[in-house]
Amino acid sequence: MDITALASLLNNILGCETKLDSHAFHDILILMAYRLIHIMPLNNSRSASRLENTLHLSLIAFITSFFRTIGGKLPVFPLLSKLARSAAEARLEEDAETQGMFLWTLFIGRATIFSQPDDVWLAPRIAGITRALGFCTWEAVHKTLSKFPWVNALHNKSGQVLWDKSKSPYDTPAEFRRNLLPSTIQFA
């Protein structure tokens, strides 16, 4: 089973009477996480391809969706967050498919490893990408996000909130930056 198949399975069984065996589910998660880390450990040098690096970090972030603390919160992964932020701030190719993947990266990152203060740079990036792709509604964004590993029950709520932040109250990334309180964040 691959990560996309896992996301699809989880989306299909939600609301059904079908139950997923918890031991099998945990085995799948552990195996997928192990494979992702084994391919390219986080503390080693990253792939020369920015696209591969971004996708790899995003898949790891997706897997962290299922890791919860005793209180039910997502744990903090400082190294993963730092690497993913660096990858998310890089410029990637401008074709629609790559931009769609990058959009998913930003949304999955916010649902898992980025925090609310990161919205300051996430929202303008999302606004720019969605504008370039011609997306005006959450439904259009969600359709693209669903092409990648995305579990509606886990990710839709934070995705919708981030979408709303990227659309309001600023029309452009420049206007968004002008209206921020003093900030040290650099935008490309």
Image: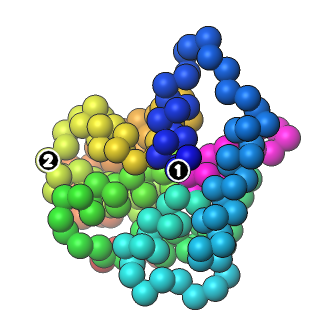
User: Crowdedness of circle 1 by 10 Å Cα count: few (<14), some, many (20+)?
Assistant: few
Q: Which residues are magenta?
A: 61-74
Mark yes or no: residue 74 visible: no
Image location (x, y in percent) of residue 182: 45, 68
Examine the residues drawn in magenta and state their main secondary structure. loop
N-terminal-most mark, 1 or 2? 1
Between 169 and 156, the residue placed more toward the observer is: 156
Q: Which residue is mark 1?
A: 2
Q: Residue furthest top?
A: 17
Which quarter of the figure is the C terminus placed in?
Answer: bottom left
Q: Position of residue 50 (x, y in %)?
A: 39, 78
Which residue carries the number 2 mark? 134
Residue at x 39% of width, y 81% of height: 49
Q: Is residue 176 left or right of residue 48?
A: left
* Place of residue 61 in the rendered image (x, y in percent of width and height, measured from the top left): 57, 57
Disc 1 on helix, strand or loop?
A: loop
Q: Residue flagged by tag 1: what amino acid is it?
A: Asp
> Which disc, if any, is residue 84?
none
User: Is residue 101 shown above or below 154?
Assistant: below
Which amino acid type is marked by label 2? Answer: Gly
Magenta stretch: residue 64 in it? yes
Q: Residue at x 79, y 37 (%)?
A: 23
Residue 28 visible in image:
yes
Disc 2 crowd, CA 10 A, few/some/many (<14, 14-19, 20+): few
Is 130 positioned to the left or the right of 2 in the image?
A: left
Q: Which quarter of the figure has residue 143?
A: top left
- In space, the residues marked 1 and 2 are separated at their CA atoms by 30 Å
Instruction: Look at the numbered discs 1 and 2 and tell me whether their residues touch, using CB distance below 8 Å.
Output: no
| Residue ranking furthest to the front | 1
For the residues carrying marks 1 and 2, which lies nearer the camera in this image? 1
